[in-house]
Image (tube, coloured by chain):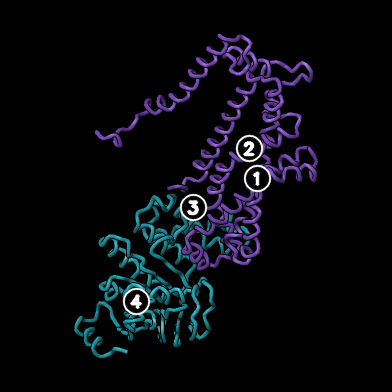
Chain colours: A purple, B cyan
Amino acid sequence: MRLINRRPGGLGILASAAVPFALALVLYVVASGIRLAENPDDKLLPGLATIGAAVERVAFEPDRRTGDYIFWTDTAASLQRLLTGVFVGAAVGLAVGVPNGLLPWFGAFASPAVRALSMIPPLAILPILFIVFGVGELAKVMLIVLGTAPFLMRDVEQRVRELPREQLIKAQTLDATSWQIALRVVLPQVFPRLVDGVRLSLGSAWLFLIAAEAIASTDGLGYRIFLVRRYLAMDVILPYVAWITVLAFALDFGLRQLNRRCFPWYGA
Amino acid sequence: MIEVRNVWKRYPGKTVLENVRLRVEKNEFVTIVGASGCGKTTFLRMLLGEVEPCEGSIRIEGAPLVPEPRADRGVVFQRYSVFPHLTVLGNVLLGLDLGDAPWLGRTFGRRRARNVARAQEMLARVGLERSAHNYPSELSGGMQQRLALAQTLITEPRILLLDEPFGALDPGIRSDMHELVRELHRELDLTVFMITHDIAEGFSLGSRLLVFDKPRVDPHEPDLYGATITFDLPVGHRRRADSIIDDINVKPV
């Protein structure tokens, strides 16, 4: 049988997906073992037991100074910023993208500006955000909004333009107004595509979140990583990075399920 | 009555239609045939209000055509006629709901129940009552076109425009659809314009057949001259083939 026709079955799929992760773990344990054998105080590749102890300390014991379980307060603070930023970014993307794609006059007015806006590297204006909005929550959320909204505006605009011309004509022959077309024809069809756009932009949203937290914050996953870096605390950094990955994966999975459940017609 | 007065359509470097003249009485069933790219679809899009003529005018019952699609002219395309995000029932309901609810575009309570009843009646008329809660992607091509007809006819247009509606269907299903369209035309007192690639369909289905073609062709610049109606034949199943051929011989414009 040709290779292109050999497919993994149920267990095969799970097992093959697990192999790279298991391999990385084994590689880490071996490398860490070698380094620790040379120097028991090595901080670069701490052993699994050390990492476990660090996780126990930050996640399941109250902080000696503040009494918080810092792992969870960091997670809550970061998720709140990320989700607020992405939600606002998506709302702006929809509010600007739909009229941009649907109304020729609106598009003529706003579309070139959106294209220009999306060329500004968001991190380059981070200092401006801190000056304008202070070093509080608003500046960090704004960075995520500014980082995701231009892409989503352009993406939504493109999705609206991709709707078949026939559909818009058809709606007009049913006497739909422009508003009704936006509400009943365009929005419901663009929404699942917006969710896909959000899934794509989550990666950059995390990037902007961690950058903002690293520079000016007193809590959050990114703040913690950059704080403990000073002590070369790899035993904290590594589980934090793994946790961020898990969170990002869960968000992506959740959005995919949302699309599947709420829009069964989508992708059919 | 629909009156097309000396309509021309030109694009830069290309004439699509030249001097199209036509009078269609209420309740006629006009089929339109012609080679690809000879302006049939442009003509239909003009009747729809999507494309404006460069010269000439189109009048419906004496009033000039508004250059925008309106509810008095329903349309079924070959594809993309139905909304993929609405169920079969939702697709038919849409026309009624849009008329009843200018801001929300959907109705509730007793009004919705009344609209649903009307929509289901229409679905039963086209034979889709069992698929009311399916999405269009779950329907066969023929069923999708039935749905498109139901969706259009629920708002009671006076004119029905069909752009190769059965072009993608199997022959067997196509003849079922012919029967349906013929019945709907009779029952609902419609004026129908239908583009088709199938000459037999053009002869058998309508009461009048229009042939679009270019009367003049410059071999060095094929886009110089546009197409127009070169044959305008009364047809229908009661007429015999030889009398149609007489018409072809007698009536070239």
Using the image, name the chain to which the residue with label 1 belongs: A
Q: Distance between the residues labelled 3 and 4?
A: 32 Å
- In terms of image quadrants, where is residue A66? top right
Using the image, name the chain to which the residue with label 3 belongs: B
Q: How far apart are marks 3 and 1 (CA)?
A: 30 Å
Q: Distance between the residues labelled 1 and 4?
A: 53 Å
Residue type at tag 4: Ile
Circle 4 residue: B32
Circle 3 residue: B85
Q: Which secondary structure, mark 2?
A: helix
How crowded is the residue under tag 2: few (<14 C-alpha within 10 Å), some, or many (20+)? some
Q: Is residue B125 above or below residue A198?
A: below
x and y percent of residue B163 in the render? Answer: 39, 69
Dots 4, 2 in contact, CB < 8 A: no
* Residue A219 visible in the shown view: yes
Q: Residue at x 62, y 67 (%)?
A: A105
